[in-house]
Image (tube, rainbow, N blue to C red):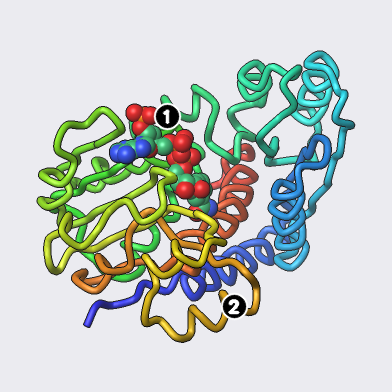
Amino acid sequence: MARVLDGTAIAAEIKAEVRAEVDRLALQGIRPGLAAVLVGHVPASEIYVRSKVKTCEALGLFSELITPPETVTTEEMLALVHELNARQDIDGILIQLPLPAQVQAKLLLEAVSPDKDVDGFHPVSVGRLQTGQPGLVPCTAAGIIEILKRSQLPIAGQNAVVVGRSDIVGKPTAILLLAENATVTVCHSRTRDLPSFTRRADILVVAIGKPALVTADMVKPGVTILDAGINRVTDRAEFDRYFAGDARREELFLQKGSTIVGDVHPNAFALAGAYTPVPGGIGPLTIAMLMANTVRAAKLRRGLPV
Ligand code: NDP
């Protein structure tokens, strides 16, 4: 029977540690602060950002939600980022993506001070990660490593295969696994014969944004699967292809009219030694790691040990 890696429980553990650290820093007069910038009205972004701000409040961090209008210019956004870079009460700056087309996202992300780059997207953060220097690591990738470590799953010497090479998930996860001494293979949309690579994995990370693409015939029995995919399913026939026979899931699907499937087909989980479910696996770690990154940024900026 495959072991379920409960991301919700692990995220709760991390958030409790963040809360304790926030209380310790308060004794030194320090309150880590996060500025969340949300442009316009993208419903999914609004939900994400509000839950980030709410989590800050719950853990005792300072947070500020800044909501420029949809029509904001690159120059206005740059001025805002420079102001936030200079503010002493702000340790982390989060610019929720996507941005409207007229805003040059790359320019903006590079204007964020690397010391406040809690998303870990700045080239300086990427360089620090690559060279093993202390810095800020993209939250989902950091969360994947936390799940493995906190579940006492070995990484060193394991064959780790990462499917997906985005700057946000795939690449940083591969670098972190390498730093933990795994033997890492990175696959992508141009990989020839993907199953021949995935079948060799002891640790299989999948972050591609394609519903249930990795199936049972593509994995080795006993593998540890980390599925970052978040794909909404609303079609009944599609639901049946993934979840036929799963009564609990069906009940929720019928109630809500949708469910979420990862990038891995549930039939592959049945063969795994351990796996992160979708939902409730990697997803909850992302906000927990954002909170941990904000506290880490507050300490790094003040020269405190992390
Ligand atoms: P991107 O679209 O940025 O990257 C997808 C990657 O998958 C690319 O490298 C692409 O290859 C590769 N890919 C696409 N199709 C295939 C295929 N058929 N075979 C092999 N590789 C393929 O996605 P993200 O990394 O941002 O996100 C991936 C998934 O993770 C999504 O479902 C997203 O919703 C989810 N996600 C979840 C988060 C969370 O849990 N909180 C946070 C961020 C993302 P190529 O480079 O060649 O195009």
Say which residue appears at 77% left-offset and 55% top-offset: 50
Q: In the image, is residue 95 above or below residue 180?
A: above
Q: In the image, is residue 151 above or below residue 285?
A: below
- Find residue 21 and report its horizontal and vertical position in percent: 61, 63
Q: Nearer the viewer, mark 2 or mark 1?
A: 2
Dividing the image into four quarters, tell me where ligand 1 lies: top left
Q: Nearer the viewer, residue 122 or 22?
A: 122
Cα separation between marks 2 and 1 = 47 Å
Disc 2 vs disc 1: Cβ atoms closer than 8 Å?
A: no
Identify the image quadrant of residue 37: top right
Q: Is residue 25 left or right of residue 239?
A: right
Q: In the image, is residue 206 above or below residue 109?
A: below
Q: Residues within 10 Å of mark 1 (few under 14, many from 20)?
A: some
Q: Is residue 276 left or right of residue 38?
A: left
Q: Earlier in the sequence, mark 2 or mark 1?
A: 1
Q: Is residue 195 left or right of residue 18?
A: left
- Find residue 185 and report its horizontal and vertical position in percent: 19, 38
Q: Mark 1 belongs to which amino acid?
A: Arg
SS for callout 1: helix
Residue receiving disc 1: 128
- Residue 139 at least partly seen: no
Residue receiving disc 2: 254
Q: Mark 2 belongs to which amino acid?
A: Leu
Say which residue appears at 12% left-offset and 67% top-offset: 221
